[in-house]
Amino acid sequence: MRKVAFYTLGCKLNFSETSTISRQFAEKGYQKVEFSETPDIFIINTCSVTDNADKKCAKIVREAQNINPNGYVAIIGCYAQLKPKEISEIPGVDAVLGAAEKFRLIELLDGFVKPENTQVLASEIKEATAFNNAYSINDRTRTFLKVQDGCNYHCAFCTIPLARGKSRSDSVENILNSAREIAASEVKEVVLTGVNIGDFGIQDGKRTERFVDLVKAIDEVEGIDRIRISSIEPNLLTNEIIEFTSTSKRFVPHFHIPLQSGNNKTLRRMRRRYLRELYEDRINKIKQLMPNCCIGVDVIVGFPGETHEDFLDTYNFLNELNISYLHVFTYSERANTAAPEMEGRVPLKERKERSKMLRILSEKKKQQFYRENLGSTATVLFENDIENGMMHGFTENYVRVSAKYDPMLINELKTVTLKSINENGTVDVEEPEMVFETH
């Protein structure tokens, strides 16, 4: 039995796809192992959101070579679609597969025999038109369920449409079938994921369904305790979606909503499809209906033309907004996007200083959100995340908690009282009694 190992860089969507591809290997008689267990085949699923993600790919290839110099190394994912020739020149890479080919790699690579020259199997992105169903299972406590792929937006900083193609979706019916399979495996939490999840519903180039249709339908699936939405654009997060999730059976009070800039001039230059006034309206609507809702925000600093005053505009906007944490990205130039051609390049040192300021603000926001939740009762999904005799998990509204390690609590939902914030920045709880929830 040949051994295969997987390494995933990047987003939840990549994790769902890696997990699905690994099941294809298992069905063909391969044994899935860890990188350290001297696999015969290494599959590396790449990201290309930042330059750093590209560099990580080369580093992992080197590590694979160190572990097994005779191992077969195949690269898939966004970086593989964007820069197949560049990857093919990395020493040790045997095959590079693009977006239209990655789900067929067992068929295309036929036995994984090391070739004399690197095989490059990467069609133009316009060929990536099929929706490939994917979800992760048995990899983590929660499952990532892919419901949408690709993007029809062309933000000035983003390579995703070039790496994943046009927006396309599975049908609600097919997703419900996947959700029922997941429920049968006793997974407690499902995260709906995609590239532009709010644009769900496009099949064969035509809109046939809406994201809110999926939200309402999947809320009825028995056997899943919690459903989380991974990330949704503010202009696609409608009042109908907010109102439904506020009273739903399974959707948790947690949204992650990309902002990218709190300055309207910068938003226009970025080619975003909203202004900050709409964003603020979405936040206010959520907090009105779900006061304890956790709201995460993506923000980019150092975009071309962003002056110090523009950045302070973003900083002050975020400071006053009722949000819970930030994911801060330092702008990096990406080939074949509009932004590098724009005037007003921000020096790298300035970009890093702005990032640092927002990361400090994020920590303050998170601690404030945690303090607001102290004394309340919440349900925690405990994970196999053990450190110094303590285990961790997340509440419905994404407060990370710590409790004394108990193997019986792993992958269990427990009702606890949030007690205090500890020196590690997580929340200690009243020790949960060994009486499990009934579902």
Image: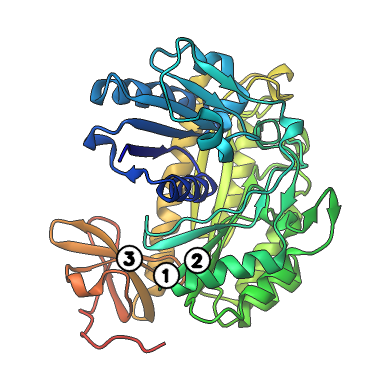
Dots 2 and 1: beta carbons under 8 Å? yes
Picture layout, residue 384 above or below residue 333: below
Ranked by sequence position, the earlier of labels 1 and 3 is 1
Q: Which residue is mark 1?
A: 187
Q: Nearer the viewer, residue 264 or 390?
A: 390
Kindly report the distance in space between the C-alpha atoms of the residues bearing marks 2 and 3.
15 Å
At 77% across and 59% down in the image, what residue appears?
201
Q: Quadrant of residue 345?
A: top right
Q: Nearer the viewer, residue 105 or 403?
A: 105
Q: Quadrant of residue 403?
A: bottom left
Q: Nearer the viewer, residue 436 or 422?
A: 436
**Residue 190 circle label:** 2
- Relative to residue 79, is residue 434 drawn left or right? left
Picture layout, residue 25 above or below residue 336: below
The label nearer to you, 2 versus 1, is 1
Q: Provide residue 31's location: percent of width, then percent of height.
A: 32, 45
Quadrant where the image shows the N terminus? top left
